[in-house]
Image (cartoon, rainbow, N blue to C red):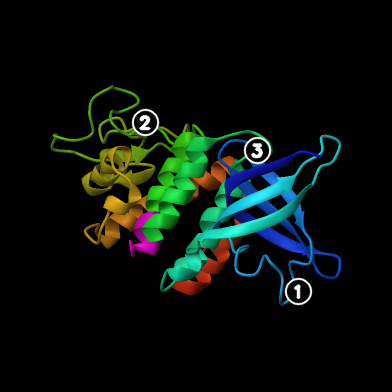
Amino acid sequence: MPLYTADALVLRTYKLAEADRIVVFLTADRGKKRGVAKSARRPRSRFVASLEPLTHVRVAYFEKETRELVSLNYAELVRSPLSASGDALVYASYFAELIDEWAPADDPNETLYRLGTSVLEAMAEGIGAEVLARYFEYWLLRLQGVYPPHLVCHRCGEGFTGRPDAGAWLAPSDGVLTCARCAEGPSQSRAGTPLSPGALTFLAAARQRGPREFGAGVAADVLTELEALHRLLMARHLEREVRSLRVLREMRRVPPLAH
């Protein structure tokens, strides 16, 4: 069996037999892999502290074409979310789960890999978890072709900014962003999920900047608007909620998504 070495992001693990673990990890050049880490659950395992969700590791593994699981030889720690403070660990699990949901097996996706590592680096530098969550969700949805264009109205083609009724609405019928004039429903009660000019400014900045360039200057109401939009887009695409959202909701006491 050939031996491969690669930088990777750990996405999830689960128990196997008495002392082993199945490890799901994403590499930059060979996509998502599932492998067996022998004796990973033993106290003196060589995998100790290197298999937490969103941990950046240098791995070596053996792969045989006829086998679904690779065999992990080692996982050397490069960067860990354990170095971050506060509630970052919960968000690290959330980011890792979303990557796992969207990354197909054995399909190289360097951009998705770089998104994960850049957010991990920003966490280590103290960038707020809520800001990183909105940034990560935006890019993940955009890379998967789920995010609607947010620079101009889908229906009339006019820009969302620089007008008296600046802002956008996610149309409930077809999932596109429209201006106030084109939004469904009477003008006094426009239908859809709203996005303020501040939220659109955040999205425009996210297109151009890396996650480490975002500080504490994003208003809480902007993050709340974007969270509502992103949760709606993810639920429509996946047709369910990811498990980590329940943990985040309990931690922050966020009400469940209305159906």
Report helix, strand or loop for mark 1.
loop
Q: Nearer the viewer, mark 1 or mark 3?
A: 1
> Pointers 1 and 3 in contact (CB under 8 A)?
no
135 above or below 42?
Answer: above
Residue lying at 63% horizontally and 62% vertically, measured from the top left: 51
| Disc on res. 224 | none
Indicate yes or no whether the magenta region holds residue 126.
Answer: yes
Q: Nearer the viewer, mark 2 or mark 3?
A: 3
Image spot of residue 233 (x, y percent): 49, 43
- The magenta stretch is 124-132
Q: CA separation, marks 1 and 2?
A: 49 Å
113, 175: nearer the viewer: 113
Q: Is residue 146 visible?
A: no
Report which residue position mark 3 lands on: 104
| Disc on res. 149 | 2
Label whose residue precedes the other's in the sequence (1 or 2): 1
Q: Tell me the kind of residue under disc 2.
A: Pro
100, 188: nearer the viewer: 100
Report which residue position mark 1 lands on: 42
Label whose residue precedes the other's in the sequence (2 or 3): 3
157 above or below 46?
Answer: above
Q: Quadrant of the N terminus?
A: top right
